[in-house]
Amino acid sequence: MKNLFLIFALAIGTICNAQVNVTENSKKEFDINKFQEALTKEMYTQFYWMTEDTTLNAAARAKSQKDAGSPICYGSKYAGMVDQSADEVEEAKKAVQKYKEYLYNSPYFGEKGIKEYYVEFAAQAIPWGYDGSLIRYGFIVDANVLVGSAKSTSERRD
């Protein structure tokens, strides 16, 4: 009887330990690098006419317009928090779709304005919080075509 009890106790202990190990191993950590790549890829997909401008990264990461150096394009900034329990690629698609809807529905930009004038973007995944355990994202678009157009127009007049 003691042997049967001992075997039964060992079997239960082994099963419980195996279950705990499976649960711990199934918890996947959110990969910020994979999320960053997915953000950029999704921006290229949904804003196919734009190119990435890494000089805008600081503005996309900034907490305020002052921190960003007060660029004119800061008005197009959009940021949010990442759901780290979600898949990185799906979370990136969702974030870019929200940004696209924000720009298209904005009275300041609109779909036509975005497609006509805005040519560059920055998309950033940002470690957040005092220990970096949270992740947020930031987007910004820029209309550099207006500066080029103004110069070429004024040069033609001279």
Image: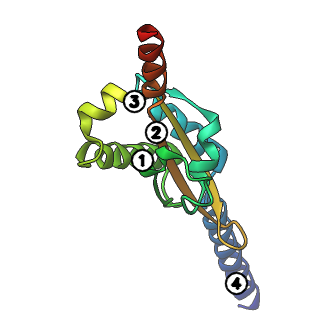
What residue sits right under mark 3 in the picture? 47
Image side of residue 13 versus residue 37, left or right:
right
Q: Is residue 17 visible?
A: yes
Q: CA distance from mark 2 to mark 4?
A: 63 Å
Categorize mark 2 by other alpha carbons within 10 Å: few (<14), some (14-19), many (20+). many
Q: In this rendering, which labeled residue sits more in front, label 4 or label 3?
A: 3
Q: CA distance from mark 2 to mark 3?
A: 10 Å
The amino acid at mark 2 is Val
Q: CA distance from mark 4 to mark 3?
A: 61 Å
Closer to us: 55 or 11: 55
What residue sits right under mark 1 in the picture? 76
When the figure is inspected, residue 67 is found, relative to residue 93, above or below; the finding is below
Closer to us: 154 or 7: 154
- Dot 4 or dot 1: first in sequence order is 4
The amino acid at mark 3 is Phe
Mark 1 touches mark 2? (CB < 8 Å): yes
Image side of residue 61 versus residue 44, left or right:
right
Image side of residue 105 versus residue 7, left or right:
left
Categorize mark 3 by other alpha carbons within 10 Å: few (<14), some (14-19), many (20+). some
Q: Which mark is residue 144?
A: none
The amino acid at mark 4 is Ala
Q: In this rendering, which labeled residue sits more in front, label 4 or label 1?
A: 1
Label 1 SS = helix
What residue sits right under mark 4 in the picture? 9
